[in-house]
Each structure stands twice: as structure tokens, then as C-alpha cells.
Amino acid sequence: MTIKDQIESGNESQAKRELTGHITGTRKEWLAARRELLAAEKELTRRSDELARQRHELPWVRIEKEYQFETDEGSASLADLFRGRSQLLVYHFMFGPDYTAGCPACSAIADGFNGSAVHLANHDVMLWAVSRAPFAKLQEYERRMGWTFPWASSFGGEFNFDFDASFTEEQQREKGIEYNYQQEPPLAEIPSRSTPDGPATFAAMTGTDLATYTRERPGLSTFVLQDGVVYHTYSTYARGLDGLWGMYQWLDRAPQGRNEEGVWWLRHDEYGKQ
């Protein structure tokens, strides 16, 4: 039956679905469905608020090590990164010493940092990215991307390893990496990233092989400074970082959602150059 035949036979709804590829309806029907969805959205918001409360009630763990970083102001301790604030957010940006450029996924997330960092800094919170690449590499990439948020190098130190954002080759190939509070099998048996094409694609985009690329992982760790003592308060990884992807917050509200099959994004200065 053709679409015209369906309309003439009274099956207009089916005809419109075939034209648009999606259910259509009247404004009244849309409003009823939207109000039903609103109830679910409000419940999700309340649940999110409750999770935030539980997150803030986690016990604080005193930092005993003396971590050192290279910054635009020279050598700095973890306490120095607070820059007079009492709270510190550290994004573990995947940029290992052997990378030639930052991870494209981390780069997409970091594109939203400039605007947020200034507001956070004026609300007693410092936002930093920290990577293991030498500081000169970070500076060069930062200039390329046009970023101004604070970015520190932990090159040669244990910070990224201690907060489960970097791993040794021995861990990766013999023991298996423990990431996002779960144990992975050794890389020799199963690749370490979940998407089928993402690891190889991103490894090539960072100038590394798969094993080197996946020894760095994305994450967020938070700290508080009280009476001169730094405490670790929270860390999250993998899809726990979803809320930091500014573009996905928009896509989740777009008509076709994320609408993705594998890796589709590039660094923001690479579009149109393929």
C-alpha cells in the first residue's frame, strides 16, 4: 500500500511515520507525552541530587605523598594547585609522555573547560587538567587548541599512577589494569577499551600504538584543603565522566540523540581537513 493509499484509507499516522521515520502527532498528543516524560525527568533530577549528597559524604583520605608538578608558574605541589581556594578538581587528561598529541576524546571534553574554569575559580574551586607528558608538550598542544585553563605536568611522578589514571606496561600485559574499580584482563588477551574501533583510531590520532595509548586513562579526582592538609574526596572514571562532555549534553536533547556508530568526532581544529 502506498502512502497515498494509507492516507485515503484513514491510516494517516502510519503514513506519516513512513514519511518521517518517526511517530508524529498533534500538539495535544505531544503535550501529553511531554508531561509524562517530565515526571521521569524530575525523578532523575531528584535521584541525581541524592547521588550528589552521597558523593559529598564519602570519607576524606589524607594525602601523605609530596607530589610535584610543572605548571606555568614553575614547580608546584598538590597544595599549590589550589591557588588559594579550598577545593580542587583534577581532570586526568590522557596525554602520555610518548603521545604526539592529546587524546581526541579528552580534547573534546576539555573544550568546555575554559568557560567553566573562571566561574569555578570564583566559587572557591580550582579546575586543573593533569597529564604525564612533559610540560613543553602540554604547552604546545594547549596553544594549538586555544585553551587557557590551568594544565600541569606530572611527568616523572607517581600522581597519575596513584589515582588510577596511568598504568605500567607490566600491569597492562601481565596483571591486567584495575580501572574504574574493576579488574581488566591482560592486554595480550583482550583490548583494554570497550568501543570496537575507538582504541585503534585514537591511538593513531595520538601517534602511538594501542598498548601505549591505553596505558593512560581518563578520570576526575577531587581534593579539599583544610588547615594546611590535602584530602582526596572523590574519583570517577569511564562513563562517570559523561556529564563533562558538553557536546553530549546537547546531543541528548537533539531530535536524533547521539546518533553515533563508533567514533565520529575530531579535535576541533581538524574538522574539514579529512
Image (tube, rainbow, N blue to C red):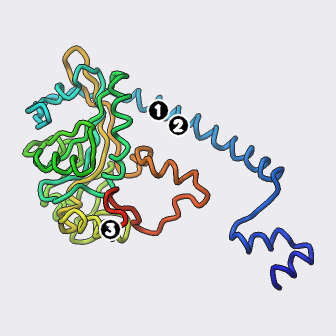
Q: Are marks 1 and 3 in contact (CB under 8 Å)?
A: no
The residue wearing badge 1 is 52
The residue wearing badge 3 is 273
Residue 134: give x, y in percent of width and height.
Answer: 10, 48
Disc 1 versus disc 3: distance between alpha carbons?
41 Å
> How many labels sit on residues?
3
Disc 3 versus disc 2: distance between alpha carbons?
40 Å
Look at the picture and state if 70 lies above or below 111.
above
The residue wearing badge 2 is 48
Quarter occupied by the N terminus = bottom right
Residue 258: give x, y in percent of width and height.
Answer: 51, 59
Q: Are marks 1 and 2 in contact (CB under 8 Å)?
A: yes
Circle 1 crowding by C-alpha within 10 Å: few under 14, some 14–19, many from 20: few
Residue 190: give x, y in percent of width and height.
Answer: 28, 70
Q: Quadrant of residue 216?
A: bottom left
Q: Considering only order in the chain, which callout, 2 or 3, is on the residue closer to the N terminus?
A: 2
Disc 1 versus disc 2: distance between alpha carbons?
6 Å
Label 1, secondary structure: give it.
Answer: helix
Circle 3 crowding by C-alpha within 10 Å: few under 14, some 14–19, many from 20: few
Q: Quadrant of residue 70?
A: top left
Q: Is residue 98 left or right of residue 200?
A: left
Three-letter code, disc 1: Ala
Q: Nearer the viewer, residue 161 or 181?
A: 161
Q: Which residue is outermost to the right?
A: 9
Residue 147: give x, y in percent of width and height.
Answer: 27, 43
Residue at horizontal 34%, vertical 30%? 118
Closer to the eye: label 1 or 3: 3
